[in-house]
Amino acid sequence: MKPYIATLGDGPDLVLLHGWAMHGGIFGPLIDALAGHFRLHVVDLPGHGHSHALGRFELADTAGAIAAATPRAVWVGWSLGGSVALHAALAHAAQVRGLGLIASSPRFVAAPDWPHGVSADVLHGFAGELALDYRSVIERFLALETLGSAQAQVELRGLRAQVFERGVPSLAALQDGLRILEAVDLRQQLSMLVMPSLWLAARRDRLVPPAAMQWAAQQAPRAHYLQLNSSHAPFISHAEAIAAAIIQFTKELAA
């Protein structure tokens, strides 16, 4: 299994991983801001975008396949893509030079010992409705991603314009992605990260609270934490700020 990976730009290698129901093209503004500084490897996760024909979307298999298909690089993942990047950093550390997480948490679902996640009922509701009307579910998820933002309508229009640009994600991949979001819990492994990490939180995020990322950054060795005044999709409204943080983080890695 080899996901579709678009490579562009020149410089240090950087892998970009999108979130649930999206594709690599969703990072358009961020790609523009980074392409002059990095050789970007922009991934379409299995069942999404140009990787539509691939089989099941599993966290470990996907992280391994991307690690095998890309050079040693800084990995940056948004939301669900952050889970893939974090898993790769733990399981394929030799391939991950540095780790960046954008609005992504080691555990997405709330638990008695984890108040920083969404209710499992929210994900169950999405999963139950996918087979009936997947477009409506995706639309509602996009609205959740921009909820609370001062530029919610602008960000929502940006996501809507991009989400189906590379076709419709497969139903199986959407279901797999929700299962990953419900099951993933990498909190206990954070102290095992051997590379520096950058945690970019969104103050107005209703899916991944900043407190979740701040806590995670405190557990990980050599971690940097930055909070942006945005919603769950900060690369639309704050692409330049995110790019600047990634560029600075990478310069510190080189030093």
Image (spheres, rainbow, N blue to C red):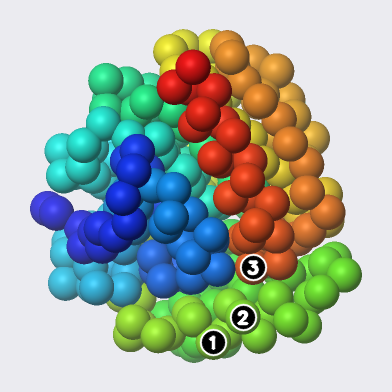
Asked if disc 2 and disc 1 are in contact, CB closer than 8 Å, the reply is yes
Of the numbered discs 3 and 1, the one sitting upstream in the chain is 1
Identify the residue at image location x=32%, y=69%.
48
- 16 or 7: which is nearer to us? 7
Gap in angstroms between the C-alphas marked 3 and 1: 12 Å
Report how far apart the C-alphas of labels 2 and 3 lie in the structure: 7 Å
| Residue plotted at (57% across, 84% down) | 160
In the rendered image, residue 149, in percent from the top left (x then y), is placed at 83, 67
In-front residue for pair 17/109: 17
| Mark 3: secondary structure | helix
Q: Tell me if 80 is positioned left or right of 215 in this view.
A: left
The residue located at (25%, 58%) in the rendering is 7
Question: Mark 3 highlights which residue?
Answer: 236
User: Helix or strand or loop: what does disc 2 sit on?
Assistant: helix
Disc 2: CA contacts within 10 A as few (<14), some (14-19) or many (>=20): some
Task: Name the residue located 71 percent from the left edge and 43 percent from the top edge.
Answer: 201
Q: Is residue 15 left or right of residue 198?
A: left
What is the C-alpha distance between the residues marked 2 and 1? Answer: 5 Å
Which residue is the site of mark 2?
Answer: 158
Would you say 96 lies left or right of 240 here?
A: left
Which dot marks residue 161? Answer: 1
- At mark 1, the secondary structure is helix
